Amino acid sequence: MRGSMSPSMTASLPTWVGRQRWYAGKGRVPVLRPIGGLQLLDPAGEVEINVHLLVDESGPTPTTYQVPLTSRRVPLPGAEHALIEKVATGDADTWYIYDGPHDPAYAAALLRLMLDEGTATSDGIEGSAVAVGHRAAPAVTGRLIASQVLAGEQSNTSIIMSMVDSLEAPSNPLICKLFRVVHHGENPDVVVQTALAEAGSARVPQPVGNISAQWPDADAPDGLAQGHLAYAQEFLPGVQDAWRVALVAVAAGSDFSESARSLGLATAEVHATLASTMPTRIATDDDVGAFTRRMRARHAAAVSEVPALAAYDAMVEASIESVSSTTWPVLQRIHGDYHLGQVLDVPGRGWVLVDFEGEPLRPLGERTRPELALRDVAGMLRSFDYVAGSWEQLHPGSSALPWASRAREAFLDGYARGAGRDPRKDAVLLKALELDKALYEVVYEARNRPTWLDIPITAIARLAAGPRSDLRP
């Protein structure tokens, strides 16, 4: 089994890939072409661990996926759900092929590559590639005793790693995120969180290490792409994200203002750290033009899905025009996909932000550019709307708008205190960013959750109503 996939595996893998939650080409059968691979070492010498880099050419734009596979001669107990295929070889052996993240041998090899700052090469797998592990400081010690894939993820695969220290006592667990779609360029989840942690911020999980790689890509400079394959950090077990905390509050009729205010303060703190540790720049005419073009495209897409939104054409166009004539703040690195589900409520530590990868379906070049910090602010305001709207879905005829309005107002108060400037003073930009997000939500809900369409449509109607009275208690 060493090296290339068997013919039967090559034939069956596209169907398996097409069924995975992380596969971006929903509704298509992948057309996979191997471009590179890596071999990781199992210290026990019992498991073959091959990481395949496969280009899917079934869509309009080729997409590169990372597919780790493990091969065992004996079935892995309890891993029937991760078994991809059984392969009989000419020497009468049978190999059991598993989705790698579900195999503890793969998890151990991945972590060891980071902590040892080792190198992995292709060594006979299709195409050439090389990966290098990078250890964060302070270095993690101990060893992995168990691993489990985190359920429910869409675009990546995360592995929870249970650890023991040198005395075999349980130590803090880790979480390793495997980037399923890989891009040429540094992954912002790695770069931004690492920059925050190195600056001393306690608002992000502490990094453990990462793996970067180089692989063939005809479209990349010199025919070689470089990017991140995986990132490990401290795991914070038993905590809830802010979405769940807010849902409990709205269901109980509890005021969320103090929590929202502290979240605004934490958000401003993270933005300030990013502005001081990563590049910033003045907005250009090109930045303004790109924003207005994207907003017009989102408006057109939303009207195509919900023709009744044409009633707001004049309001949308006026908002777009006002963006072009207002003064823009300095652009900086931001979270990029900020909502209540991206923040953890950690006892004794407060709000901790996670998942700085940005919107996974946007090109990496867009996700790594300096942006308006107000985009994160607008994203969180929309998230409070969604908490209220989701509660209203279960309670027809009842309104949670007052709850959401108080939460939004408190969040902005907290952000203003932490940032030293009230985001409501940039009302033109903030309204445009909220509107842009709501238009995006219309398209998403129309295609995926039509019963939730009222949430973004109601927001657009409120934004059209004039001054931000929707933010008043």
Image (spheres, grey):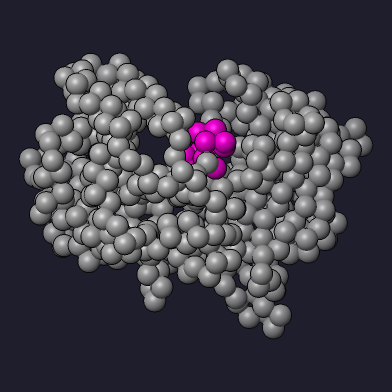
The quarter of the displayed image where residue 226 is located:
top right
Quadrant for the C terminus in the image: bottom left
At a point 65% along the width and 40% down the height, the residue shown is: 185
Residue 212 relative to residue 426: left or right: right
Q: Position of residue 5 (x, y in %)?
A: 80, 33
Q: As drawn, is 447 to the left or to the right of 367?
A: left
Q: Is residue 319 left or right of residue 39?
A: left
Q: Is residue 66 above or below residue 78?
A: above
Q: Quadrant of residue 447?
A: top left
- On whether residue 161 falls in the magenta region, the answer is no
Q: Residue at x 85, y 56 (%)?
A: 45
Per the picture, the main secondary structure of the magenta-coloured stretch is loop
Q: Position of residue 1 (x, y in %)?
A: 85, 39
Start-end of magenta stretch: 358-368
Please tell me which residue lies in front, 136 or 140.
136
* Residue nearer the viewer, 266 or 18: 266
310 to 370, vertically: above or below: above
Q: Position of residue 435 (x, y in %)?
A: 27, 34
Up the image or down, 467 lies above or below 407; here it is above
**Residue at the extreme right:** 91
Residue 329 visible in rendering: yes
Q: Residue furthest bottom?
A: 167
x and y percentages locating residue 35 in the rendered image: 77, 30
Left or right of 469, for residue 279: right
Q: Is residue 72 visible?
A: no
Which of 374 and 13 lies nearest the eye of the viewer?
374
Report the residue at 42% width, 47% height from top. Answer: 330
Counting the numbered discs, the total is 0
- Residue at the location (80% across, 25% down)? 7
